[in-house]
Amino acid sequence: MNTTSVSCPVDGVKVNENKVRTTAFFVWALMSTYLLTTVWVIPALLLADFALRAFNFGQWSPLGWLSGRFVKAFRLPVQMIDQGPKRFAAGIGLVFSTTILAFHLLGLNPLLLASIITLFAALEAFAGFCAGCHVYTLLQPILRKK
């Protein structure tokens, strides 16, 4: 996909990209742990955390709080970006973590979904690649019809 054709949701509120990427790192670490252990508490924790961030209650996010401490402790620079794409990505994470938890509790195999969210988190954390913007772009024809 040509990156010039990518459309991201924008809300005008700025957030620190290093904090966002650190949060993505913690999501990656937790989901990697889930892939290794299949402990249901991990997607449940992520479901709650994604919900807080997706519905604009990020100040209550445990991963956001931990990321803020990490960024401050390691004196990572502040690089402001729009939070819209990150809230949209948190919404995608909410859908995935809810589905992963439901599959787990129903005895279905959630490992493909867990692998996808782990990959998306790794792309954000390690490469600064926002898969949410690409998903948003693919959803535009559907969203415009409403």
Image: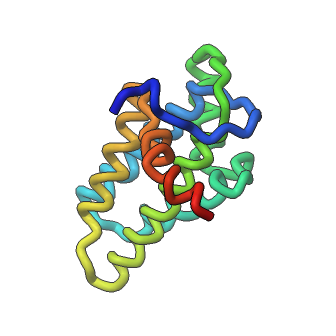
| Quadrant hosting residue 85 | top right
Q: Residue at x 40, y 78 (%)?
A: 102
State whether residue 127 appears in this view. Answer: yes
- Is 107 placed above or below 109 here? below
Q: Is residue 97 left or right of residue 20?
A: left
Q: Is 66 placed above or below 43 here?
A: above
Most foreground residue, 59 or 94 = 94
Image quadrant of residue 48? Answer: bottom right
Residue positioned most to the front:
145
Q: Position of residue 16 (x, y in %)?
A: 65, 27
The image position of residue 14, as x and y in percent, is 72, 30
Q: Measuring 31% from the left and 49% from the top, which residue is drawn there?
A: 32
Q: Residue furthest bottom?
A: 106
Q: Quadrant of the C terminus?
A: bottom right
* Number of marks present in the image shown: 0
Query: Horizontal and vertical percent for residue 34?
Result: 32, 58
Which quadrant holds the N terminus? top left
- Kindly identify the residue that appears in the image at 31 percent across and 61 percent down: 113
Residue 113 drawn above or below residue 85: below
- Counting from the top left corner in percent of width and height, residue 13 is at 76, 34
94 sits to left or right of 107: right
Colour scheme shown: rainbow
Q: Residue at x 33, y 85 (%)?
A: 106
Q: Nearer the viewer, residue 72 or 138?
A: 138
Say if residue 50 shows up in the picture.
no
Q: Nearer the viewer, residue 40 or 131?
A: 131
